Image (cartoon, rainbow, N blue to C red):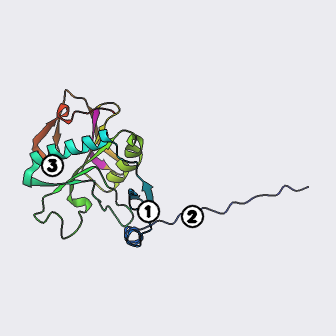
Amino acid sequence: METAVIIEPPVTRRKISVDEYYAMYRAGIFGENEHLELIEGELIAMAAMEAPHFSHVMRMARLFIEQFGRRANVAIQSPLPLNAYSEPEPDIAVLKWREDDYFSGKPTPADVLLVVEVADTSLLYDRRTKLPLYARHNIPEVWILNLLSKQLEVYRSPKENDFAEKLMLNSSERVEVQAFADISFAVSDMRIQPR
């Protein structure tokens, strides 16, 4: 008796473009409070933001706005189009200064000076998915505010899917912003606290 061979058809995923994503949004396909990111053509449901995460985002935004003034625009949880299939929403994006606050068009990867992700439950996702994505699109500097280990992770010099420079800083250290040699922050001012 011959053994039957089962042949599985190849699974083909259909990517969703940024334009299609916005068309679906305008058509009311997504729930009113649904928080999604488009990453490499796939819709990723984001976890609800709890108080510690929210607090850290607000604190970092305040520090940045106070220090950068009119030298950079600070975007908080705003869409960042990277290509036709990816539009993440980093917790904070520090952008090249534009007087119109990007009214004339969303920023491109070339406008980004620094991206900050606040991470507790999202730490592995931020490291495994978003960091390589930012590296592929030449985002020059990414910080992960790691609430679990109370550290600031600094990634610089993108190279393919990774960053050549990686720093793990604790509360006794300072960090300079690569785009502004005269601006630095004490990690202790970020008051990194887990929930």
Which of discs 1 and 3 lies nearer the camera? The answer is 1
Local secondary structure at mark 3: loop
As measured in the structure, the alpha-carbon distance from the residue carrying label 1 to the one carrying label 3 is: 30 Å
Q: Are marks 1 and 3 in contact (CB under 8 Å)?
A: no
- Residue 187's place in the image compared with 60, above or below, is above
| Residue 153 among those drawn in magenta | yes
Residue 162 percent location from the top left of the image: 35, 46
- Secondary structure predominantly adopted by residues drawn in magenta: strand
Mark identifier at residue 58: none
Residue 136, quarter of picture: bottom left
Q: Which residue is mark 1?
A: 41
In the shown orientation, is residue 188 left or right of residue 90?
A: left
Name of the residue lying farthest toward the front:
32
Residue 16 percent location from the top left of the image: 44, 66
Type of the residue with mark 3: Ala
| Residue 51 among those drawn in magenta | no
Mark 1 crowd level (few <14, some 14–19, many ≥20, 10 Å Cα):
many
Q: Are marks 1 and 2 in contact (CB under 8 Å)?
A: no
**What range is drawn magenta here?**
151-158
Q: Nearer the viewer, residue 166 or 126?
A: 126
Residue 177 percent location from the top left of the image: 16, 43
- The number of numbered badges drawn on the structure is 3
Local secondary structure at mark 2: loop
Q: Nearer the viewer, residue 76 or 177?
A: 76
In the shown orientation, is residue 7 left or right of residue 110?
A: right
Q: Which residue is mark 3?
A: 179
Type of the residue with mark 2: Thr
Badge 2 or badge 3: first in the primary sequence: 2
Q: Which residue is mark 2?
A: 12
Type of the residue with mark 1: Gly
Badge 1 or badge 2: first in the primary sequence: 2
